[in-house]
Amino acid sequence: MKIARFNGGRIGVVLADGVVDVTAAAGVQPSQWPPVGPVVMIRDFAARRPAMEVQARTGPRIPLSQVHFETPVPWPHKLIAIPVNYEAHAVEMSSPAISRNAGFFMKSSASLTGASDAIVLPDLPGREIHHEAELAVIIGKGGRHIDASQALDHVFGYACLLDMTVRGKQERTIRKSYDTFTPVGPYITTADEVGEPTDLQVTLWVNEQVRQDANTRKMFLSVAQIIEMCSAVTTLEPGDIIATGTSEGVGPVAPGDHVRISISRVGEMVLKVAQGKRGANVAIPHNLAPRTAEALS
Ligand code: MN
């Protein structure tokens, strides 16, 4: 099942000929704040699924042209990310700090956006802002100390994810947490439709030029091993999102670009890149040069 969130917090099942609104069957209230309905739906999915499937078969189709895809899980308990999970990307970043098993870091959940939203670049002249194409794992059944051999039973589904990043020496979290820096979508494809996540092709284009193209079999840590590692430290909850790391080919984006990400059996989305007005701060200043001169004086 392909489950989208759209048009103001509604839940939809995505079919070949459009989207069917299954909000009521999913038990989600679109106007609820905080918007934790999708997390509860994921927790209760086994019980909710039959009614959602009936509605999907019988409900009216909404054409894709009338669907604004929003981020599928807007208020997850955690947004976890794996730093470097493909050898060729470790080589291109050529940092001694990057190891085969560097653990994980956190991004702000407020950086989540959907497939129909723009990536808004902070105004940081001279700083490169890169795309990182990644497979997103959405946790279905939570837990602690999950063994890798059982880990895929804890996966609700998968989605495309972009881990947008300001390059530089500041902490990863601040460089990767700007609003709109974690597009997820266009929907969650449930794990039963994806099968083994060990041979998924993850491809990214900027303005229709291929920049990243790698298979998840090249991951240092598999999805199952990632879940084992994360849950050894922190209790995973339904709806938690894990960005599983990027491959080689990362590079800068600019306002006006179109970024397309496709993952086999999972989905595809295209995002516009726009220029924002602000975003500089004491840690990531607007212009490094005067600040350095000031520090030296
Ligand atoms: Mn990343």
Image (cartoon, grey):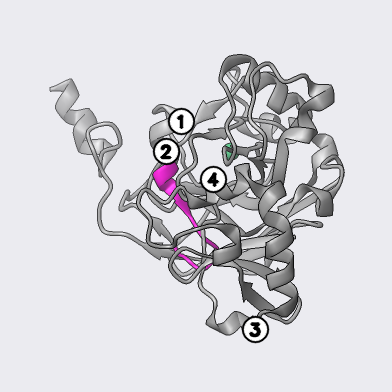
Which segment did they paint magenta?
A: 109-118
Query: Within 10 angstroms of label 1, few (less than 14), some, or many (20 or more) residues?
Result: some
- Nearest the eye: 132 or 267: 267
Question: On the rendered structure, is 266 left or right of 116?
Answer: right
Q: CA distance from mark 4 to mark 2?
A: 17 Å
Q: CA distance from mark 1 to mark 2?
A: 11 Å
Q: Quadrant of the N terminus?
A: bottom right
Ligand 1: give its quadrant.
Answer: top right
Q: Of callouts 1 and 2, which one flags the residue occurring earlier in the amino acid sequence?
A: 2
Q: Amino acid at mark 4?
A: Val
- The residue carrying mark 4 is 39
Mark 3: which secondary structure? loop
Question: On the rendered structure, is 113 left or right of 135?
Answer: left
Does the beta carbon of the residue at mark 2 sit less than 8 Å from ligand 1? no
Q: Of callouts 4 and 1, which one flags the residue occurring earlier in the amino acid sequence?
A: 4
Q: Nearer the viewer, mark 1 or mark 2?
A: 2
Res. 108 mark: 2
Q: Amino acid at mark 2?
A: Ser
